[in-house]
Amino acid sequence: MQQLSGSAKENKITSKLQKRRGLLSKVGEIRVLVVSRDSSSFAQDGPDVEAADSPVLGASFPFPVPCAPKKDKKLLIRSHGGRVQASVLENGILVEHYSSGITDTSVGNIYAGKVSGILPGIESAFINLGEEKAGILRLPPQNKKGAPRLRYGDPVLVQVTKDPRGHKGASLSSKISLSGRFMVLMPSSSTVGASSKLEGRERARLRKALNEILPKGEGAIARTAAAGCSKEALENDYEALEKCWRDIEMRYSRLASSGRYPALLKSDSDLALKLTRDVFNDSFSALQVQGREFEKVKAYVGEMNPELLDRVKRWDPSLEEEDIFDHYGIDEQLDQGLERTVELPNGGTLVIDKTEALTAIDVNSAKFSSRSGEMENTATKCNIEAAKEIGRQLRLRDIGGMVIVDFINMHLESDRQLVLSALQKAMEGDRSKHAIEGMTSLGLVEITRKKLGQGLVESFSRECENCHGRGLIISHEPAKATGPKDRPSPQV
């Protein structure tokens, strides 16, 4: 009997699947799955995977493209034991968590720095910020006209754009930006724009309003929260930011002339107000505050967003008979967010590992249960469920940089597109800048994401003093295979 090669076997399998489930065709740049009437293998899995009508050429998909239901979003703020913690819930599920002094980020901090070293070869300078590690400032090309020449010991006004990580110091920029409720002011730029998340007409309206408000030589970008706001609200926001900028300039000039630098000039250290400004909007059903931060948060919302004031509620543990975090199960969900392995509802798992260059997420079917006997169906269902959880885990753990996801291998291009669609929808609520690349033939997906803070696992853990983060006990003799009970304990 003639043996089939690997590629021939895969083509034969794909052909059989396509005959059973449909034919994959291409019309222009739109991939369309024309499904056969016999979709009983999918119907066996119950109502969650019933065929949904496709908007493309009247075809129907055996899996519905995942549509996120309307989310009940809540922002919880708790002041307890001298520390402020905040959590964002979507339908009762924890998706973001912040803690003052732990998950705080230095991004946005403005310093009067001191040049401590210049590296012409990579057009960079080390800037002493008065912190543990010096920051790194990219310099303009030396042949660029009007570019300032820095010398050792010079003062320089800089802003942190990326937190320090490992042995690397913070990334810095000399182009200062100040965030307000409705806009980001850029005093040294003439760029005027609006958030890409806004609709075309609204973006044009906001750009026109900003051009009328801003003086020549200053720039600004309208934030997503500016949707529907009046020109008067934008003017008030600009006046507050302009006052803040003048104060920073005055303090920097005074410190530079007296030689009292490096020094911190501005920091968003108030976690409760920062999250109320950046996170809380009309998509939230409630902002519940426990502790002394309530009056401050209520006053801020009353001034900046009076239409949302009725959603700000005080949580009194003595009246509610329990702590707000206990009521919503925050601590239990936090514990799950710190684990290496994440269990999926139907038995699959995610294994999340961090390396120096990237974060790897491996999708395993494990004990995934599906009443369909077809492997392709099981793999696709498990991958879709994993994609939804990956979107949540990236936000909860605040994973940044490059992320590689190893999904279970699928043969049909249509199934790969379904998984990518589920992943994209799962990350729609992520306010961090991110991008999702296509899936390779091996089931690998590359995601890039900008961190918002220090990261959940990094904030609530420290490196092991014995293995220094490797998770291995090194021996000078070959280590024989032993069971968990026989393995030696690290010496403390």
Image: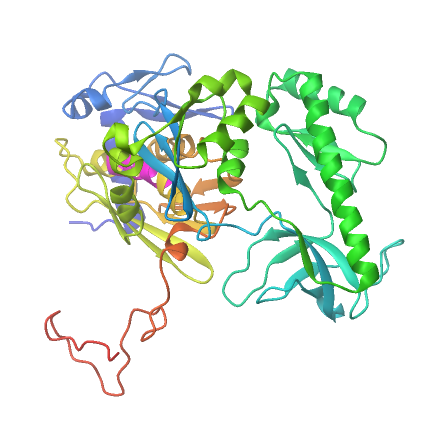
Q: In the picture, which quadrant includes the C terminus?
A: bottom left
Total count of labels: 0
x and y, in percent, of residue 412 in the image: 32, 35
Q: Return the residue nearer the eye: 100 or 449.
A: 100
Vertical position of residue 89 compared to residue 156: above or below: above
Residue interval drawn in magenta: 380-391
Magenta residue check for 323:
no
Magenta stretch prevailing secondary structure: helix
Quarter of the image where one finds residue 490: bottom left
How has the structure been colored for display?
Answer: rainbow
Quarter of the image where one finds residue 230: top right
Query: From where the camera sits, is residue 448 visible?
Result: yes
197 on left or right of 248: left
434 on left or right of 241: left
x and y, in percent, of residue 225 in the image: 57, 25
Query: From where the camera sits, is residue 141 visible?
Result: no
State the residue at coordinates (57%, 67%).
132
Magenta residue check for 383:
yes
